Amino acid sequence: MATRARRALISLLALLLVSASGVASKSFAITNNCEYTVWPGILSSAGSPGMDSTGFALAPGESSTMPVPAGWSGRLWGRTLCSTDPAGKFACVTGDCGSGRQDCAGGGAAPPATLAEFTMDGNDGMDFYDVSLVDGYNLPMLVAPEQGAAAAGAGAAGGNCAPTGCVVDLNGACPGDLRVSSTTAGAGGVACKSACEAFGTAQYCCSGEYGSPGTCRPSAYSQFFKNACPRAYSYAYDDATSTFTCAGGVSAYAITFCPSTTSVKSAGSNPQAPAGLPLINGTMVYQGGDQFAGAAAAARPSLDLVAVLVGVAALALARPTPQ
């Protein structure tokens, strides 16, 4: 018994030392505010330490917190409209990772999917993170850094340490050329492809002769995403307004699917948010049923109609000519 108690004490001390040294000092607090179940998927980058889980279910209103290893890099996304067939194979209509199970086991998200991307403890000890629509969009997501009590008392974390994401429902407003529809449970539009995924051309995929920041420019399709979600990546070289960093003091990152009006307003008031870069573009119209659209549309019906008509015309002109 004494030996067992001694081992337990040693294990406890080891855990305390690990926490104090920062090896597992950060966490992801993942919350599902959607009215439907979301299955988060997690993929660690090559050479990165692994996470405790690579996929699980979150019912509406449910949250889960998981530790993040020091030096972790990878991506996290939400899968929707998932089910298990009679043979026991698990699959999702959007964001499926191809594992056939709830855990992704090294599989990445099939596009289109809204992605949260992280590199923890990178250059100069900073965390790098972004929300990317480069592979398309399937549901709203907000990433917000949270400071520990000691760091909060000492001041804000350094770097461009601010919330980011795409907090509106774009599935209803998605251009027809990019829209992904499903008859599952009468879902209708369930995701929105990137132009690269839809057309596969070098111009939209920033490849070949368009494989540099100087030659790959925003398109009318990427501007659809950027206008709606100013802080999210809309195409491959959208770094200037879409990469965020925290230099220290951050103990957790809150990752929220379908963030509420309250959480978005709170995030938008963050004093470190980049000047002139709101989380929501109030001049856009969203037809996907998100909670932010009603007030904006009611306040500016004529301006919103003009914005939509201009956007539709631009997308029609940008449609690639059949070869």
Image (cartoon, rainbow, N blue to C red):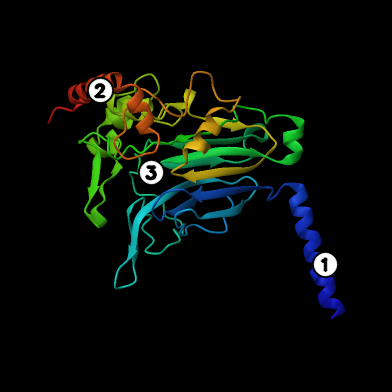
- C-alpha separation, residue under disc 3 versus residue under disc 1: 45 Å
The residue at the point 41 percent across, 27 percent down is 237
Is any part of residue 284 visible from this angle? no
Q: Nearer the viewer, mark 3 or mark 2?
A: 2
> Which residue is identified by label 1?
9
Per the image, the residue denoted by label 3 is 139
- How many marks the image carries: the answer is 3
Looking at marks 1 and 2 on the same chain, the residue that comes earlier in the sequence is marked by 1
Comparing marks 1 and 2, which lies closer to the viewer? Answer: 2
Q: On the image, numbered disc 2 is attached to which residue?
A: 305
**Residue with the most extreme right position:** 2
Whether residue 232 sits left or right of residue 182 in the image: it is: right
x%, y% of residue 83? 33, 63
Residue 161: percent from left, percent from top? 60, 30
Q: Amino acid at mark 1?
A: Leu
- Check disc 2: other Cα within 10 Å, few if <14, some if 14-19, many if 20+: some
Most foreground residue, 157 or 69: 157
Label 3 sits on a secondary structure element that is loop
Residue 308 x, y percent position in the rendering: 25, 24
Q: In screen coordinates, is 74 left or right of 293?
A: right
